[in-house]
Image (cartoon, coloured by chain):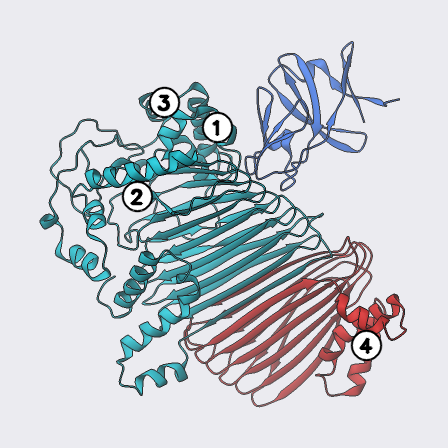
Amino acid sequence: MANYIKALLVDDLPPGSMKTVRVGGKSIAMANVDGEVFAIDDTCSHAECSLGSEGFIDGNVVTCGCHGATFDVTNGKVMSMPAVTDVASYSVKIVGQDVLIAL
Amino acid sequence: MQNTYKYGFHKPENYVYKSKKGLDRGVVEYISKRKNEPLWMQQFRIRALGQFYHKPLPLWGGDLGGINFDNIFYYISPTDKIVSRWEDLPEDIRDTYDRIGIPEAEKKFLSGVSAQYDSEVVYKSIKSMLSKKGVVFLDMDSGLREFPEIVKQYFGTVIPSGDNKFAALNSSVWSGGSFVYVPKGVRVDLPLQAYFRINAANMGQFERTLIIAEEGSFVSYVEGCTAPIYTTDSLHSAVVEIIVKKGARVRYTTIQNWSTNVYNLVTKRARVEEEGVMEWVDGNIGSRLSMKYPSVYLVGRKARGEMLSIAYAGAGQHQDVGAKAVHLAPETTSQIISKSISRGGGRTSYRGLVQIMMGATKSKSKVVCDALILDEASRSDTYPTMDIDEQDVSIEHEATVSKIGDEQLFYLLSRGIGKAQAESMIVNGFIEPIVKELPLEYAVELNRLIQLQMEGSVG
Amino acid sequence: MNIQILQNTTKTIIQEIHGGKAVYEYTVTERAQLALLFVVAQKVDVEIVVRVCLTGRGARARIIGLVAGRGSQIIRIHTEQIHEAPDTTSNLLVKAALYDQVQFSYDGVIRVEPLAQKTDAYQKNENLLLSPHAHARSDPVLEILANDVRCTHGSTTGKPSEDQLWYLMSRGITRSTATQLLIEGFFERAIMTISDTIHQEQIRKSLWQII
């Protein structure tokens, strides 16, 4: 049974925005894509920059601010080099005003 | 029309279109509209422009302080005809071409005396041979137009626009370059040479090249020229992306001899899958400052990368060049051989990276850098990095900097050979292991060029 | 801390490095000779700079750094061989045996100034990885502004040779003893360059705290 932990409030993450949160000992990048919220590991699999705080989001594509590697925020899949490994992606549930992540 | 056949002096001008200097969103939109590009490419360019503004200049490498970004034409529209005569060329340029032994057709092309017609003829016959095999070899603009789905799948996936400031610049204003696609299992034995299929406009400042070698294929691509290219364009920032799929092999050879007012800042990278092989052969002879580190990302088991680099720096030149090998899978191998020569106050710096990521077990890498400093005024540096995160590997690096050996020199002098000639023989012998990997005519030209440089006749 | 090796003298220094950060500077003057061996074999993080300047004609320096690391130590070593005068020689060797999750980084510069003609300078870094999670980074640098010189650097990283292990095991020695022998042998050659046997024992003792 997945363990859902509260990450932030719905109002903290308006559509088109992305932020880094620390939940359950991990750094997670959370993004709101047209009303739907997604969560992936915040650490870029290339040189470990923070995707949420140093990167950019455009639609569902997260671009790392350091060297431009891109990931699909809906599933963590890597889309361009210099990263070559996917990042972990986490289930998200919205309960009332709270956004919960399964870790 | 600004003469893109590139002399140090202006030809009489018939302006069909004159772009303004400097870069802004309007210039980028104009470029994209003029080329009739799909929306995604226009958006790609605009996003890259933002990244270019956002990213800082690197704090390492050569001195980039002399680049004035506002004083550059970022786009010049193509010419249809080039109007000039061989006799109008400065005598020393004609002389150099003669002495290096550039073939007639190339001379005319390089000097802008319109080999366009000639190259069209040669190009057409190569094109028909290639298309029978299903091989695509076009300029990048045409590649995007005729194969939009393939381009969209791969463009910017090896070098994303945010990779570094100059990749971002290229991504926003790129024009020209090559698009090569080789289908599964096809071997292209004839080296594909850039200048055959391009016209004046495409020998540009911001070339973008994309090469895709499907499983089990082979292709060899050659670009550049040993003959000095005189250009008023002071910034050249190209991007080359190469995808080597399972069991395929790609060799990419470049010889660069831009005039010494040029900043040559290039991002070149190959993604190599299982059992694939990527070979970079890189010769840097010209430019005021070159910063170029051909890279391989070895992402599949048993993938291999080989980088051969020659750098020559004379007065007023700094070659800050090298190679990068990133090992991401088991049993991958890389080999880097770098030979550099600095003379007359020139400076060569080898800059390289060998990175073994966790999981790349049983990987091997060997790097050998040899540098000759020919006189007191010159300088040579080596800046390699080995970053190793796997235990079961074998990583070796060695570098040597020295002058021409007294014994070798004495041997030749005692046979009645003049000092300048003896030194140039020794230098040619020094670079021979790499020169022998070049297509024959390049090898011959390069040897002669070095000889001329050493004897003080040119450069 | 700066130690001067006076003209025409020879000095041998065995320096045991303790934890924490420190800078060790040595100036080798005209026709002086320095033999320096430093040992890093602590159970804590270490970050050191070892700077050797050859300021007088005919100066010579031989530097050996022996490093052994365990646990989650972070060990950073930065060395400098700076040649400012003609006819100088330096030879530096850093050998590291790395266990567990040790993070080791070595960066070393050989810099030859324009006046330092007829310099011979060598630098070698050899890293032995003894566990799957040890990490080594090596950045040897050459900056050469004189031309009548010979400067070389090298770096190798890997695990103990399987061939050598097989050889020892085929003589009835267990794998773990064979590995231990190889590690001790890895350092032994360098230790033997110090002629004083009391110093040699001192060095071995320091290393055996870790290896």
Q: Extreme top residue here?
A: A96
* Circles 4 and 1: CB atoms closer than 8 Å: no
Say if residue B65 shows up in the picture.
no
Classify mark 2: residues with Cα within 10 Å, few (<14), some (14-19) or many (20+). Answer: many
B255 to B425, vertically: above or below: above
- For residue B29, the mark is 3
Mark 2, chain letter? Answer: B
Residue at 59 percent of width and 17 percent of height: A16
Where's the N terminus of chain B, which quadrant? top left
Marks 2 & 1 on one chain: yes
Mark 4, chain letter? Answer: C
Image side of residue B448 versus residue C180, left or right: left
Q: Position of residue B14 (x, y in %)?
A: 13, 31
- Colour in which chain C is shown? red
- Colour in which chain A is shown? blue
- Could you give the CA–CA distance between mark 2 and mark 1, rounded to whole angstroms? 23 Å
SS type, badge 1: helix
Q: Which residue is mark 4?
A: C204
Image side of residue B235 versus residue A81, left or right: left
Q: Which residue is mark 2?
A: B195
Report the front residue among C201 and C101: C101
Mark 1: amino acid: Ile
Say if residue C91 shows up in the picture.
yes
- Could you give the CA–CA distance between mark 2 and mark 3, rounded to whole angstroms? 28 Å
- Colour in which chain B is shown? cyan
